[in-house]
Structure formats: structure tokens, C-alpha cells
Amino acid sequence: MDMKRAIITATAILALTAVSGAQEPPSATANFVNAAGEENGTAKLTGTEGGVLIEIEVTGLPASQWVGFHVHETGTCDPATGHESAGGHFNPTDAKHGYNVDGGPHAGDMPNQYVGADGTLRAQVFNGSVRLDEGDTNIRGKALMIHGGQDDYESQPSGDAGDRQACAVIE
């Protein structure tokens, strides 16, 4: 009976050790604010070995159109500056802007997203050029930006995507 109890105890200890050793993937959140400084959406970011999955829901955007969506270099969203405080696109490798340009895209470039008829943008976007909490491509502390028009994927330096409609600091 003592041997059976010892085996059960050892098995339980091994199982607990295995479970406690499992690591959660890095994650972050961001709260969007519009040009008036009002909160109008959220983002949840999950790090993977290959990049970052970004899930967003933002309201009050220009309805029924494509809009630019990027990671910007500075984690400051000041509505008084039209969110210009967030700087340019995140570009740790000094690449050119856009998917349609030799030497592009920036690490912060992402595909345009479609805003529904009710002015709400819901999307899941994967960016394989960035990471959470590691190296030069770490985007924690940077900003997510939604523009008022679509990115043309080639104009320098930022795609001619229009005014900055919503900004969120990645925390």
C-alpha cells in the first residue's frame, strides 16, 4: 500500500510541475480614443512565435469604407494634436512604406480594414513583422492607429491614408 501511495504522490507532483511550467503567451491591451478624446474601442494583442494577433473593435468611424490601420512608433495618443503625437509608422528596419513598393513594407504596415455601415470596425489582423516584449520589433508601448481613408500601399512615407481617426497605446 505504501508503494502505491508513493507512486500516486509522485505522479501528482510531476503533473503539477508540468502544468506550472506552461507559460502563457505574451498579451497586451489597448483602448482607442477618437479625435475628441473619447474612448471608442479596444484591442487585444496576443504574441505568437510568428508575430502578433491583433483583435480590434472600434466604433464611431467613417461608415462603409476601407481605412488604414498601422502600428505607430510612439505610444502617445493626444487628441489635441490630431493624434500626431504617435509619430510615424513603426519602422525599426528603415524599410519603405507599403506592400506595393520595393523595400517595403514598414513593420507597422498592415492591410486596410473595412468599417461597416454602422461605423464599427471589427477585425482580427495578424502582423508577422512585430513581436510583444522581444527585440527591436517589440510593439508594447507603441500605438495602434486607424486612419480616415485607405492606405494606398505605396505613397511615402505613410500611404496617404488621411486623418488619424482613432489611436490606442499598447500596454
Image: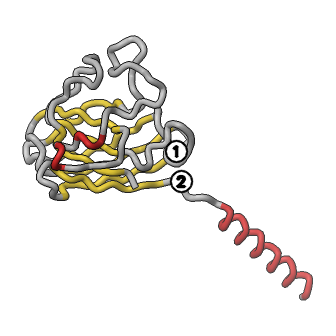
Res 6 quadrant in image: bottom right
What residue is shown at x 20% (from left), y 24% (from top)? Answer: 160
What residue is shown at x 9% (from left), y 40% (from top)? Answer: 62
Q: Residue furthest bottom?
A: 1
Quarter holding the N terminus?
Answer: bottom right
Please tell me whether mark 2 sits on a helix, a strand or a loop: loop
What residue is shown at x 53% (from left), y 37% (from top)? Answer: 136
- Badge 1 crowding class, 10 Å Cα cut-off, few under 14, some 14 to 19, many 20 or more, is some
Q: Which mark is residue 144?
A: none
Quarter holding the C terminus?
Answer: bottom left
Q: Which is more N-terminal, label 1 or label 2? A: 2
- Mark-to-mark CA distance, 2 and 1: 7 Å
Q: Nearer the viewer, residue 70 or 8?
A: 70
Residue 32, position in %: x, y?
Answer: 24, 52
Residue 141, position in %: x, y?
Answer: 41, 49
In the image, what residue type sits under mark 1?
Thr
What residue is shown at x 23% (from left), y 39% (from top)? Answer: 84
For label 1, the residue is: 48
Q: Is the residue 3 above or below the residue 87 in the image? A: below
Q: Nearer the viewer, residue 115 or 4?
A: 115
Res 110 quadrant in image: top left
- Badge 2 crowding class, 10 Å Cα cut-off, few under 14, some 14 to 19, many 20 or more, is few
For label 2, the residue is: 25
Residue 4, position in %: x, y?
Answer: 87, 82
In the image, what residue type sits under mark 2?
Pro
